[in-house]
Image: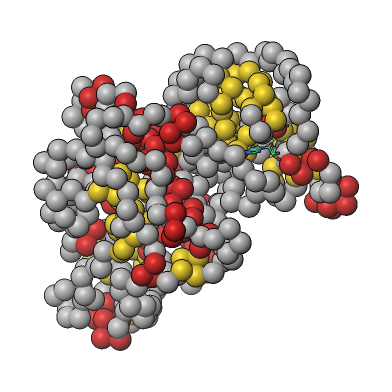
Amino acid sequence: MFVPPSFNAPEHLNSTGCRIKYSEGKGRGVFASRKIQRNTVVEISPVLFCGVEEYENFGKSTVLDHYTFKWKDGRTALALGLGSLFNHSTSPNVSYTLDSHTDSIRYEAVRDIYPDEELCIFYGHKLQFDPLDVSVSAIDPEPEDGWGGLSAVGNDSERPLENADPNEIVDELSLPFTMLKPPPEEEDSTSIRTVLAWVVDVPEPRHITALIKWLKTSGLEDPNLGHLKRIRKQDNRTTLLLSVDPTPPQLPVELGLARPSQIPVPSSAAMTLTSLRLKSTFWPTFYAPKRKGEVEPWSRGKVAWAREAMQVVVTEALKAQSEGELPVSAFMPVSYDEGENEKIVVARDTRTSASHPLRHAVLNLIRRVADSNLVHSSSSEHGSNYLLTGKMVFLSHEPCIMCSMALLHSRVKQIFYLNPMNKTGGCGSVICLPFLQGVNHRFEIFVWKEPVSNLVINETLDV
Ligand SMILES: C[S@@+](CC[C@H](N)C(=O)[O-])C[C@H]1O[C@@H](n2cnc3c(N)ncnc32)[C@H](O)[C@@H]1O
């Protein structure tokens, strides 16, 4: 991008503390003119739309392609105001949400931002330019108190080669983490793990379709029930699986159905034929003969993404420590496949500054997700605003038993942690909460094994 040497950005009339300035090597950028508190909406940019065909024919090959956002319906959107000037960072301090109700993009600080700091968003993993990024040490001189010395996650020699294919699958042994193996599959009726689910008898077959449609919009759809068939036909009775919520679902009254009842259903798919037979005596269950504990294939690109995520964790922990907190942090990145309107959320342990013993990083992270969902959506109507369903969370330390339980409640998909907590950890060290019998959700646990300096804290502390 060409930037004249005497580049002077105009002052901008933004009341939330943003101004335009030249950002070395990146062109113009958005900078904080004063301290901006986390969760501040720093900008709302109205957008101009371009239709799919129109953009393909006239927009794509122009400079516009460096500025536009893909809208949910496939159109291309150009953000007005400051929206087109946020530069990219892999550890962004601003997240954005596409708002179809107002045809605008809302930008929000994900952490406190300090005067003169650049405000950056995350563009995604497929960039059209060579990104410059602010390195950890450029923002945070490492504290010289004996434990630090960390400047980057990972061993350079193990990083993907410049021109290596990002889709190439990485051998399991070369991954920067190892997966904790869950206990062996249940093979007798006493060891089947179950959860209580709400079900209802549906005598009229035509009501099934209506109910399934209703379930989709009711907020009760739960991806954690994906291992169970929706309908059970037994002795001329058709029964529909509804939810595992603690409260009974309120069914559409016009269908005149009986009240839902609660029964135990298997908490996971069957991995052997014996297990399938046993589990299906509770409720029809899918057969998924994947070996338990098998790591799904990881591409080079995704491994690089995970390393970046761990880098954010380390950055935040270092920063927390330099500001008098414990060096403990949690990070929920945008997933590698970049779903729509995904949020980036980062949190640290604040029990020192808040003088509150429960302000652990994981709890702060979940609370932050919930607060943000409360503001931006109606999902809270069903009490689901705290959910991290399908998400991956990166942590500086193994979570304590309380935080492991919170993660379990949140329905997180996978966690990655750097430092095991041998005396207090709830995800493998003292106990492994998601592997316990009777819990209503399981998540996968990965322990980071690549050499990274320890973020040392008292090992008897819960984190
Ligand atoms: C949406 S524009 C951002 C505003 C832009 N800097 C300007 O002056 O108009 C995106 C372009 O900014 C530049 N850019 C954004 N983030 C960057 C980064 N981290 N490193 C280098 N260039 C960056 C790239 O040229 C990119 O195509």
Q: Residue at x 66, y 33 (%)?
A: 25
Residue placed most toward the observer, 269 or 430: 430
Q: Residue at x 52, y 14 (%)?
A: 34
Q: Residue at x 14, y 75 (%)?
A: 190
Quarter holding the N terminus is top right
421 is higher (above) or lower (below) than 190:
above
On the question of residue 280 being in view, the answer is: no
Residue closest to the far right: 58
447 is higher (above) or lower (below) than 111:
below
Residue placed most toward the observer, 287 or 23: 23
Q: Does 335 sit left or right of 18 as displayed?
A: left
Quarter holding the C terminus is top left
86 is higher (above) or lower (below) than 174:
above
Q: Does 137 sit left or right of 262 as displayed?
A: right
394 is higher (above) or lower (below) than 450:
above
User: Quadrant of residue 242 in the image?
Assistant: bottom left
Q: Residue 348: x percent and y percent?
A: 33, 34
User: Quadrant of residue 459 in the image?
Assistant: top left
- Image quarter for ligand 1: top right
Q: Residue 195: x percent and y percent?
A: 25, 62
Residue placed most toward the observer, 405 or 237: 405
Q: Residue 76: x percent and y percent?
A: 75, 44
User: Quadrant of residue 184 in the image?
Assistant: bottom left
Q: Residue 271: x percent and y percent?
A: 32, 79
Q: Does 168 sit left or right of 248 as displayed?
A: right
On the question of residue 152 being in view, the answer is: yes
Q: How many marks?
A: 0
